[in-house]
Amino acid sequence: MRQTIVTAFAAVLVVAGLWAAPASAQVQIDINHPNVQPLPIAITDLFGASAQDSQTGRDISQVVSADLERSGLFRPIDPKAFIQTPDSLQIQPRFADWKAINAQALVNGKAEMTQDGHLRVEFRLWDVGAEQALIGQAYNASPLGWRRIAHMIADAIYKRLTGESGYFDTQIVYVAESGPLKHRVKRLAIMDQDGENHRFLTDGADLVLTPRFSPTTRDITYMSYYRERPRVYVLHLDTGRREVLGDFPGMTFAPRFSPDGNSVIMSLEHSGSSDIYVMDLRTRHVTQLTSTPNIDTSPCYSPDGTQITFNSDRGGNQQLYVMNADGSNIHRISFGAGRYATPVWSPRGDLIAFTKWTGGTFYIGVMRPDGSGERLLTQGYLVEGPTWAPNGRVLAFWRQERMTSRGRGGSDKLYTIDLTGFNERQLITPLDGSDPAWSPLLP
Amino acid sequence: MKMRFLTVVAAVALLAACSSNEEAGKANTGAGTAAATTAAAKPGVVPGSQADFVANVGDRVFFAFDKSDLSAQARQQLASWVVFLKKYPQDKLTVEGHCDDRGTREYNLALGARRANSVKEFLVAQGVPADRLKTISYGKERPAVLGDNETAWAQNRRGVGVVGE
């Protein structure tokens, strides 16, 4: 199923540049200002000649609209306010009609099923003020791929208007939780970043934790208590095959892929001490990178693969450290009040996101890799485990609500938040969720 | 060091008392530790079983926040585990390490492992063969008590013995 869609996408036809953006275009979003007013954008239903094509066009436009709205940077205008009709819009936008409803940007296009059974979709993005087309693209895919086309259109619009790469054509893998709080059933689950196409990857028989994507998005490394032996595994999404990484006497945990996908870095526990190791997946050769009686865990590579950040209690309590990829030059980077954990390097390389705890409150924050510029984005009774969207502008994390003495609350939910600390949204999942990991843009 | 000496003495005393269930019960009450064995007095509880261990020895010890060292109370409790394990040499013991939820998931997995290992090291030092002992950490994934308050957290920071064969 998945395979079918992906293969079809090899045939994606991109005609970007057909409507080259003129230098006079004015509409632009400054993403670095958190209080920026969302850009009013009119996203019309993609035109379809048949009833079926018309429905597909409407579905795609709704997904595009929802993606852009969720980013907090766009305000899609209610289609009920639109003046120009879709069939006349097909010929040429009447910009006065769009200015009248204060639209600054306009999206139109069409969807059609081709004779060979492919879905062909075109869209154009217009600068209403400048009365000019900004971009236009066409896509061919299997009919099942309409959602991905919608996310790719949203990414193209986001990129054109913010200057940043998009993050909508992505997936999130996480731990779905159900059952009694004392003995939660935990299953790996995967979904599109908007919560659609949700499916479970494991059956709940074994406790599973901390899934993370490979750079290709086709493999997940995670921890499983299969046969009550807590170990790091890799799950190959296309085959469903699972394999344990290595045969060690103690627990292996906290895995992440290296940026080139050739290695998995993880913690290995032996006689109560946890150190950081890296396994080359091609040779299965294992290299020990840290060696103390302390707890060294939650390792994560820099995007260029030259450095590793991790947390350790070697200084007395949990703090963040950075070292070279060969384990040399270990130095502490967090010096604020409290404890720091789960450092995750931004895909852009400029920031490290973390979980912090001080004074009974947990925070999600970011700092530069040298430890400067600490900024806290959100807080709660328990917030934990940030993960970056591939453009480094949005983070997902999980939040556990405080439990009352009557045993209410206490469940985990997924959230997203902008790097600015604004636009926090719950990511709706069928069950409770924790340990989200955001994929790179899908190949 | 002094504490360890005292614990050994307590363990020896318990061992000596094991020849008589009644006396064992009294001695244990006096020492403030769980009874090493009174299983015979309870119908349906198989001596040397997990049920026996839970009911008559006490299957858990507790830790301070973010700590894995054993308190005097924990050492006393573990001394009675040693007695039990020596009395039932066919038994194996899995030591589970657990944490409260005031910490991050991965760190707590490591902390739970350190707690389980503390318990194991004590038992081995008291003469329990290492090959009868196994450790596993559950981090903060398996709370014993629900509630977001100090009482609940204290009961969740624990090492638990699970008897198997």
Image: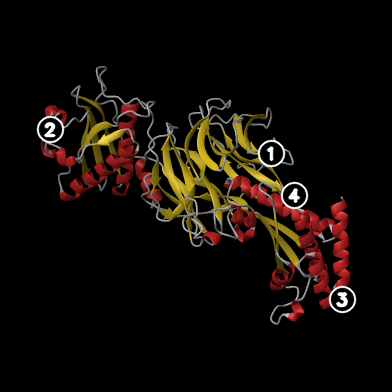
Residue drawn 87% across and 76% down?
B19
Label 2 or label 4, whichever lies nearer to me, is 4
Pointers 1 and 2 within a single chain = yes
Category of crowding for the residue at label 4, using alpha-carbon neighbours closer than 10 angstroms: few (below 14), some (14–19), many (at least 20):
some
Instruction: State the residue position of label 1.
Output: A287
Q: Which residue is mark 4?
A: B69
Q: What residue sits right under mark 3 in the picture?
A: B19
Q: Earlier in the sequence, mark 3 or mark 4?
A: 3
Nearer the observer: mark 2 or 3; the answer is 3
Q: Residues within 10 Å of mark 3 (few under 14, many from 20)?
A: few
Query: Which amino acid type corresponds to the residue marked 2 in the rendered image?
Result: Ile
Tell me if B89 is positioned left or right of A351 in this view. Answer: right
Q: Are marks 1 and 4 on the same chain?
A: no
Chain name for mark 4: B
Q: CA distance from mark 1 to mark 2?
A: 63 Å
Against A171, residue B57 (above or below) is below
Looking at the picture, tell me which residue is in the foreground, A58 or A123: A58
Q: What colour scheme has been applied to the protein in the rendered image?
A: secondary structure
Q: Give the alpha-carbon distance from disc 2 to disc 3, as whole Å.
A: 99 Å
| Nearer-the-camera pick, B138 or A159 | B138
Under mark 1, the amino acid is Thr
Q: Quadrant of the rendered structure where residue B48 is?
A: bottom right
Give the residue at mark 2.
Answer: A91
Residue most extreme to the top: A23
The amino acid on which the numbered mark 3 sits, given as a three-letter code, is Ser
Q: Is the residue A181 above or below the residue A41 in the image?
A: below
Find out whether the residues at labels 1 and 4 contact each other: C-beta distance under 8 Å. no
